Amino acid sequence: AAVTFTACVFDSGFGQDTSVFTPTKPPAFETPLPIPPLAESEVVDGVRVFSLTAQEGQMQFLEGMTTPTWGFDGDYLGPTLRAHRGEKVAVEVTNALPETTTVHWHGMHLPAAMDGGPHQPIESGGRWRPEWRVDQPAATLWYHPHPHGETEEHVLRGLSGMFILDDEHSQSFGLPTEYGVDDVPLIVQDKKFRSDGEFQFDSQGNEVGLLGNVLLTNGAWGAVLDVSTELVRLRILNGSSARTYDFAFDDQRDFSLIATDGGLLEAPHITDHVRLSPGERAEIVVAIAPGTETMLRSLPPDLGDVAVPGAYGGLDEFDVLLLRAADQLRASPPLAERFGDISRFTAVDADNARIFDVQNREINGRRMDMNRIDEVMQVDSTELWEVTNRDLFPHNWHVHDVQFQVLDIDGETPGPELSGWKDTIYLEPRRVYRIMMRFEDYVDDENPYMIHCHLLLHEDEGLMSQFVVSRDEASRNAGPVDPNGG
Ligand code: C2O
Ligand code: CU
């Protein structure tokens, strides 16, 4: 698998002062894939309690170079939290960083005050203890900071982790479930390093944000996974701030896409590639023969009708992870043919409709304002949204609190890869995405949830708006409302 690397070592940037590291040779793919540890927890009075500390650290991602990092309970990334549907969970978060941050539970259905968005800051030295009941299908979720205007930098420094939810339904198919063995989390992030080893944060005028030239998988550049089973389940998270990937294997082998952001599809979808924009997840199951190898790669993604040549920095193919099978493999149960129906929204179910136009750093002509509630959703109502990227460069669309279904794209039913629950979706320019979701359980007229582009530079620059879920029917479509009633 050839990756093109430029010959030059440093090129000078602007904005951030110093020059940028450019790899001169591909990594050897000999580093054992680091597996984020499973977070410990204790059940106290019926609540499963985790604790997480955001802290400073340092890593050697590149030979001979030390990179200052941030991590949860360690130098980089964070442990994998895991809980079962129906459980009450709490997380005791401590901020040992020199600045204010937040921790958001991406994809989780939970009360707005527990959501960890920009309205739940944790000051340096401070603590925060959200608590909620897990009540949604098994899925691969994740957590990351969400401080307004600072999300890209905090995520780039290393603050991210997975939050895996289990339920009986998903456990009834004999899917690979041995964590780190045949059920493997993959946090994929592109990075740019300065010549002094520090992360580059400045996107240097790139419209989509920071695009890196080094690809880290669970924090390792050039990682190998030693496979001991016939089937491997990979839970892939695009944890990058700007880059969209198209994951495939170097031998174009087929694999089964089994789950998207919000859980299992109705049936495994056999394909040879899957596109993920920032924040999206895919669970895939791939078969490997004894004694063989295959490389998980990212191919240049089809971004739709984008008109920004070089938006991807001229480097858009990466080797991600080498899978190396042992000479003898443990048998895996065959993959189920069906997981079961997902009850579908149809347009007639909609109690209310909204239109969202995304352009530059605005949603419907407005930038994020922490003091303005942009939309009021009525609890126990189903909504149909028409979302369009009016630009000719990439955006995506992420909604807190809910998982949505994609009804159609330019009037056409989407393919199987968009047939399940989603919380984040790539928006190909100038196409109309109709999505449907239901707001339920949690009412709070004060604390908003967020809707935003998950290209983190865009989010930070204001491509985000706020909604509350209310009991008050009259407030539907009320437009800007001052949360303080003024
Ligand atoms: Cu993953 Cu509002 O975030
Ligand atoms: Cu965007």
Image (cartoon, rainbow, N blue to C red):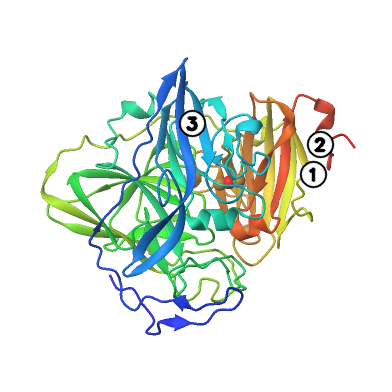
Question: Amino acid under label 3?
Answer: Ile
* Quarter in which the C terminus is drawn: top right
Mark 3 or 1, nearer chain start: 3
- Observer-nearest residue: 450 or 17? 17
Outermost residue to the bottom: 8
* Label at residue 483: 2
- For marks 3 and 2, give the one nearer the viewer: 2
Q: Could you say where residue 455 lies in the image, as x and y percent from the top left?
A: 58, 57
The residue shown at (61%, 40%) is 400
Question: Amino acid under label 2?
Answer: Pro
Mark 3 or 2, nearer chain start: 3
* Label at residue 371: 1
Judging by the rendered image, the residue that carries numbered circle 3 is 342
* Label at residue 313: none
The reply to whether residue 7 is in sight is yes
Q: Is mark 3 within 8 Å of ligand 1?
A: no
Q: Quadrant of ligand 2?
A: bottom right
Q: Could you say where residue 258 lies in the image, as x and y percent from the top left?
A: 38, 41
The residue shown at (74%, 42%) is 354
Question: Amino acid under label 1?
Answer: Asn
Q: Is mark 2 within 8 Å of ligand 1?
A: no
Q: Give SS at disc 3.
A: loop
The residue shown at (30%, 63%) is 222
Q: Give SS at disc 1.
A: loop
The reply to whether callout 2 and callout 1 are in contact (CB within 8 Å) is: yes
Cα separation, mark 2 vs mark 1, equals: 7 Å
On screen, residue 61 above or below 168: below
Q: Could you say where residue 257 lies in the image, as x and y percent from the top left?
A: 37, 45
Q: Could you say where residue 106 lies in the image, as x and y percent from the top left?
A: 54, 41
- For marks 3 and 1, give the one nearer the viewer: 1
